[in-house]
Image (cartoon, rainbow, N blue to C red):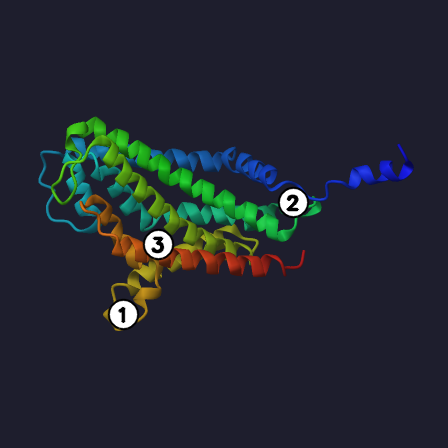
Amino acid sequence: MTTATMTAAPAQRTTVPLLRLYRAELRWIFRRPRTLVVLGLLALIPVVVAIGLAIGRSTDQGPGNGGVALLTTAAANALVLPIAVLAVTLNLLLPLTTAMSAGDAVAGELAHGTLRGWLIAPVSRGRLLAVKALGVATFTLASVALMAVVGVLAGLAINGTGSLYTLSGSTLSFGAALGHIAIAVGWVTLQLWAIGAVALAVSACTEHPMLVVVSVLAGTIVSSVLLLLSAVDWLHPFLLPQSWDSITDVLRDPMPTAGLAEGAARAACYLVIGLSLAYARITTKDG
């Protein structure tokens, strides 16, 4: 072996494979005690709701709307419970957990000094952002899927498999019901990916993870309030929560797709804009 070959051998790998970085990020996320606690609490919500519905089955629930009306219907419908839980938590709790994950991904690691280890390794800042975005996306998908699975099991436990009927009155087979629930999981996850992209853009601008959480929650709450004001109805099509009520369309047969498609397109726009802003910030940030 020549001297030139010996000196060239160590320089063959100049970058770390993306899959290896992704696995390392997932290990970091799902070994974090806070992540496990959050997932445990999210899994507990459908159980608590199911127990409450089973106890109060004979109680007059009174009129309701939105998620409350869905929860009332879920007392006798195993299909509705997982989707009702997702609809209720989509308004605040799920965006909160997504913001926490995005805040820890960049701002949290920057505050603790662990982000510099990524930059010391042969990892470009664009690849770093891609890994962090994939980590946040995986966590949100795991959160939504976990709630849906526990919701399905809890709904079947209190209602059985004979209560899988839609809001249109038609009865679904177990496989068809799982298909509707899978569509709801995918649609809700896309909405959370949009929130996560915006949260990553904020996280790339600060070293304080709580600032990311507060910013995302403030944006979600303000958007929900603006949707109630007819004076700014021209602004409604640009607000992400505009189509969140469309998740109930999954419970209809045939399933209306206009609201779901509009919500998916809006979330995709937020996703592209959020990741673009995060990329522009993280690639130009000093340190």
What is the crowding at mark 1: few (fewer than 14 residues within 10 Å), some, or many (at least 20)?
A: few
Left or right of 225: which side holds 117? right
Q: Position of residue 230 (x, y in %)?
A: 23, 69
> Which residue shows up at 54% across the image and 34% down it?
27
Quadrant, the N terminus: top right
Q: Position of residue 4 (x, y in %)?
A: 88, 40
> Which residue shows up at 56% across the image and 57% down it?
279
> Which residue shows up at 42% across the image and 50% down it?
193
Q: Which residue is mark 3?
A: 264
Q: Which mark is residue 118?
A: 2
Q: Position of residue 188 (x, y in %)?
A: 34, 47
> Which residue shows up at 66% across the image and 41% down it?
16
Q: Nearer the viewer, mark 3 or mark 1?
A: 3
Q: Which residue is mark 1?
A: 233
**Based on the displayed image, in which of its 4 quarters is residue 167 positioned?**
top left
Q: Tell me the kind of residue under disc 1.
A: Asp
Q: Tell me the kind of residue under disc 3.
A: Ala
